[in-house]
Image (cartoon, rainbow, N blue to C red):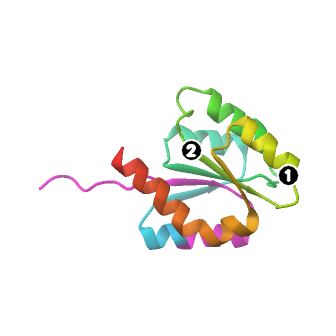
Amino acid sequence: MGAPVQVPAILAVVDDLLFGVKISDAAAKLGVGFRFVKTAEAAWAGALAAPALVILDLNIRTLNPLELVTRLKGDPGTAGIPVVAYVSHVQVEFRKKAEEAGCDRVLARSTFSTSVPALLAEFTRAKAEA
């Protein structure tokens, strides 16, 4: 019998406890590993481990999220990692900047909140099939 398939991890760059719980609950139900970080250095180190997905709170107060996205998407070692970000629905211009920086998807906080399980399943399944 072959070795068990290791499920790819989720890297969550968030500092909001409510969203952290939503992400960890969804990841646990899928049997997916996850790691939470709050600094640019920790986010970069986590991305180098090639997670299936980076989740980014664009309103995080502990780092510059657009700089992080630009760095992730500009480095050959991390450019292929999908980044799903969320932001307040009223921050239309900031959403556009995040998309221009390279976010694969930018969702309103409310949409992200209700779609966490589906997003994690989609991206971890895609990584496992790759």
Amino acid at circle 2 = Pro
- Marks 1 and 2: CB-CB under 8 Å? no
Q: Nearer the viewer, residue 80 or 17?
A: 80
> For mark 2, does the 10 Å Cα neighbourhood hold few (<14), some (14 to 19), or many (20 or more) residues?
many
Q: Is residue 24 magenta?
A: yes
Asked which secondary structure carries label 1, the reply is helix
Residue wearing tag 2? 82
Residue wearing tag 1? 92
For image coordinates 72% across by 42% down, the residue present is 40
- 19 sits left or right of 120 in the view: right
Q: Position of residue 79 (x, y in %)?
A: 57, 33
Q: Is residue 64 visible?
A: no
- 58 sits left or right of 6 in the view: right
Q: Nearer the viewer, residue 16 or 94?
A: 94
Q: Position of residue 73 (x, y in %)?
A: 63, 33
Q: Which mark is residue 38?
A: none
Task: Tell me the quarter of the picture where residue 88 sits.
Answer: bottom right
Q: Is residue 66 magenta?
A: no
Asked which secondary structure carries label 2, the reply is loop
Q: Position of residue 129 (x, y in %)?
A: 34, 49
Task: Tell me the quarter of the picture where residue 22 sits.
Answer: bottom right
Residue range highlighted in magenta? 1-25
For image coordinates 87% across by 54% down, the residue present is 91
Label 1 to label 2, Cα distance in Å? 21 Å
- Quarter the C terminus occupies: top left
Amino acid at circle 1 = Val
- Sequence-wise, which precedes: disc 1 or disc 2? 2
For image coordinates 11% across by 56% down, the residue present is 1
> For mark 1, does the 10 Å Cα neighbourhood hold few (<14), some (14 to 19), or many (20 or more) residues?
few
Q: Is residue 87 visible?
A: yes
